[in-house]
Image (cartoon, rainbow, N blue to C red):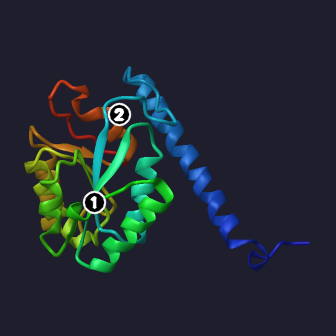
Amino acid sequence: MKIKFSDLDRRSFIGTLAAAGATFVTSRRAVFSQRQGEPAVTEKAPDGPVLKAGLVGCGGRGRGAAGNFLEAGPNLEVTALADVFQDRVDEARAVLNGKHKQEIPASNCFVGFDAYKKLLDSGVDIMLNATPPHFRAEHFAAAVAAKKHCFLEKPVAVDPVGSRSVSAFSTEPSARFWRCALSAIKGRSGSGSGSPAGPTWST
């Protein structure tokens, strides 16, 4: 008897596809790393100095990205939040405290269209950006100017102007552009050397 698509559990179906895709990407990355003489990608990042992340965009995807960051290795903290809406900040703060034991002080919770600027000045090492994509190019430019590591949700831009902006700023000598949190963590903020990491792209 043929199995109809409606008979399949949707979550299982999508989960299977996602797992297969992740395996494919990971295997390609591992092969590329070996060819380039780089260490193979590991499931968890190595130990190192504490890295402080600030979350810009505190909706569901932002909270998920913050959780992924915290689970990617040891000595990782989320210390600041920024969003246009107060209720989003409050909800993210409660979730991160309850689920991940991250006690984010009220003084590090920022609201408004300029909240990301205040977050970048709060002492974070990494900006986790999960805002609507229209704002990401501007936020990325500010993060590069502040010499911060970056995680940007895709797409990083929605028009030619934004795409060119991200491309231009990612080649700046001070750029620390990381498409995945694990790469940012492996950088460990220059591993104490103070030297900025080069831009890293993943497709």
Residue at 14% in and 29% down: 195
Label 1: state its secondary structure.
Answer: loop
- Does 123 sit left or right of 66 as displayed? left
Q: Position of residue 193 (x, y in %)?
A: 18, 24
Viewer-side residue, 152 vs 201: 152
- Residue at numbered disc 1: 105
In the rendered view, does 185 fall on the left or right side of 64?
left
Residue labelled with disc 2: 186
Q: Nearer the viewer, residue 181 or 122?
A: 122
Q: Nearer the viewer, mark 2 or mark 1?
A: 1
Q: Residues within 10 Å of mark 1 (few under 14, many from 20)?
A: few
Residue 181 versus residue 163 in the image, above or below: above
Q: Nearer the viewer, residue 122 or 148?
A: 122
Taking the spot 43% from the left edge, 60% from the top edge, the residue there is 97
> On screen, 111 above or below 171?
below
Which quadrant of the structure image shows residue 166? bottom left
- Amino acid type, label 1: Pro
Picture quadrant where residue 116 is located? bottom left
Q: Which of the labelled discs sits on residue 23, or is there none?
A: none
| Residue plotted at (29% across, 68% down) | 57
Measured Cα–Cα span from mark 2 to mark 1: 27 Å
